[in-house]
Image (cartoon, rainbow, N blue to C red):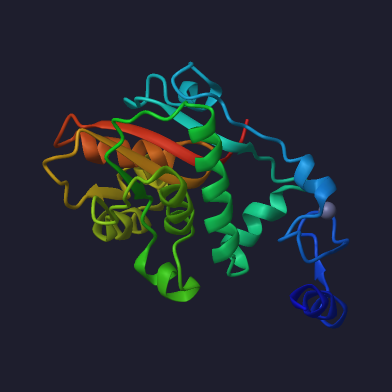
Amino acid sequence: MKEIYNSFIDVIFPKYCLVCDNIIYGHEQYLCLKCEGGIPYGYYNLGTENPVEKTFWGRCKIDVAGAYMKYRSDSKYASLIKNIKYDGGVILANDLGNKYGKWLKSNHVIDDSFDCLVPIPMHPKKLKKRGYNQSEEIAKGLSYSLGIPIDINVLKRDIYAESQTKKNRFSRWENTRDLYALNELNHNYSHIVLVDDVITTGSTIESCVRAVHQFTDVKVSVLALGFTL
Ligand SMILES: [Zn+2]
């Protein structure tokens, strides 16, 4: 009965693949089978001097880093990340985070010293407008499959640094690294994992790691959904 009902729903409200726009069916969530099979996985096994880890060499101290997908803004798969950011894609963010966590677990590349997942904080104004922080939603999916708790209090956006940056537009680029600050760190933590949506220049992560290491030598690792090569 449920299947008949689902097919009925498919006819009345067809869903479309986020990547190719073809109609998808009940058992397919947001990608058709063909697009699901073609995801440009980035994996980059943790701790193997992969391209994600190399991005931070000489910039800040990262223990291990990895990303689920290779990301290019002109790739048809870019729509997955865009949907997470701009179309209220909470479920998509949860699901991709969960899938990445499952992959890490089944390939035994996850470090059991990870104490918590720390989503990159969003500017309060932006958070109010969007209604959710996509990094936190990705972290929820990762947390579900990895069984590692989320701590949203470790980092904060440094609003003061940001307003100073805006005042002096000539030093805007130099100051990107000061946009985050350490807020509250549980003393029991020895290894925290930053969670981001896409790593492009790496400056956001660099800013966060510097903010943390200014006050403590806790180990910092990074998990992201996308990585731009
Ligand atoms: Zn498709």
User: Quick one: quadrant of the N terminus?
Assistant: bottom right
Residue in the picture at 47% in, 75% down: 129
Residue in the picture at 14% in, 37% down: 215
Residue extending furthest left? 187
Q: Position of residue 22 (x, y in %)?
A: 88, 61
User: Quick one: quadrant of the C terminus?
Assistant: top right
Q: Position of residue 42 (x, y in %)?
A: 62, 32
Asked which quadrant contains residue 41, the reply is top right
Residue in the picture at 46% in, 47% down: 145
Residue 167 visible in the current orientation: yes
Q: Nearer the viewer, residue 8 or 215?
A: 8
Q: Position of residue 90 (x, y in %)?
A: 54, 65
Asked which quadrant contains residue 39, the reply is top right
Residue in the picture at 85% in, 83% down: 12
Residue extending furthest front? 1
Residue extending furthest top? 48
How many numbered badges does the structure rendering display?
0
Residue 199 visible in the current orientation: no
Residue extending furthest bottom? 12
Q: Nearer the viewer, residue 82 or 4?
A: 4
Asked which quadrant contains residue 67, the reply is top right
Q: In screen coordinates, is 45 left or right of 147?
A: right
Q: Nearer the viewer, residue 113 or 223?
A: 113
Q: Position of residue 181 (x, y in %)?
A: 24, 49
Q: Is residue 69 above or below residue 10?
A: above
